Amino acid sequence: MKKIIFTFLIIFLVSCGYIPSSHMAGKVLGENVFLRINISKQDPQNSVFITDILREAMLNKLGRNITSENNADSIIIVTMKDLKYTPMIYDKNGYVVNYKAELFLEFRLRYQNGKEELVNTKGSYYFDINPNSIISDKARFEAIKNASSQAFDEFVSIIAIRGYK
């Protein structure tokens, strides 16, 4: 039974022309990508977290090679525009127990043909904290990691759409 369902799923995906968005984004970006993340002077620690997460996402989600600027098919310059934490849920005593982290990133793309493009994305992540406490480093890192990943996925989707055109 599992083989029949698996076979049907494969035939369905192949016959409907499904192409992964990472493949289409790869066609737009090329094989070799130069990735520079601008460190925010106002928030350098969070910028470093975002740098690591975006480099990992570029390698794992898109499978592109991160290379020097001279050897790149495309250049991506990422700037953190804003990171904010908004209280979402309060307990019966009025203490915040849930926050929403929102991360706004700007991706500046430069293709081999010299064309430039600006893509703004947003990622968000909800997380709990203990009542009457501050946001721990672990919770903050987890929020930044997930919001960065979501913002990067939005970027990949936008680039993939350009690959279909």
Image (cartoon, grey):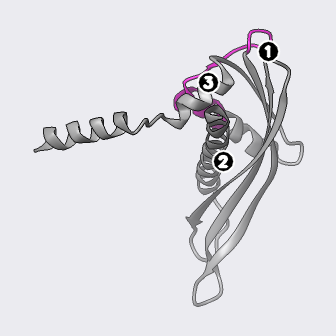
Q: Looking at the image, is mark 2 or mark 1 earlier in the sequence?
A: 1
Residue identifier under label 2 = 151
SS label for mark 3: helix
Q: Is residue 57 left or right of residue 80?
A: left
State yes or no: discs 2 and 3 in contact (Cβ < 8 Å). Answer: no
Q: Nearer the viewer, residue 77 or 128?
A: 77
> Alpha-carbon distance for marks 2 and 3?
20 Å
State yes or no: residue 91 in magenta: no
Q: Quadrant of residue 58?
A: top right
Residue identifier under label 3 = 27
Please provide percent x and percent y for residue 88.
64, 75
Q: Nearer the viewer, residue 17 or 53?
A: 17
Counting other residues with Cα less than 10 Å from the Cα at mark 1, is it few (<14), some (14-19), or many (20 or more)? Answer: some
Q: Residue at x 15, y 40 (%)?
A: 4
Mark 2 or 3: the one toward you: 3
Q: Residue at x 81, y 18 (%)?
A: 113
Name the amino acid type tagged 3.
Lys
Q: Which residues are magenta?
A: 53-72
Picture quarter with the C terminus: top right
Counting other residues with Cα less than 10 Å from the Cα at mark 3, is it few (<14), some (14-19), or many (20 or more)? Answer: some
Q: Nearer the viewer, residue 36 or 117?
A: 117
Please provide percent x and percent y for residue 118.
82, 39
Please provide percent x and percent y for residue 70.
80, 10
Name the amino acid type tagged 2.
Ala
Q: Looking at the image, is mark 3 or mark 1 earlier in the sequence?
A: 3
> Alpha-carbon distance for marks 2 and 1?
23 Å
Residue identifier under label 1 = 69
Picture quarter with the N terminus: top left
Looking at the image, the residue that sits furthest to the top is: 71
**Residue 56 visible in the snapshot:** no
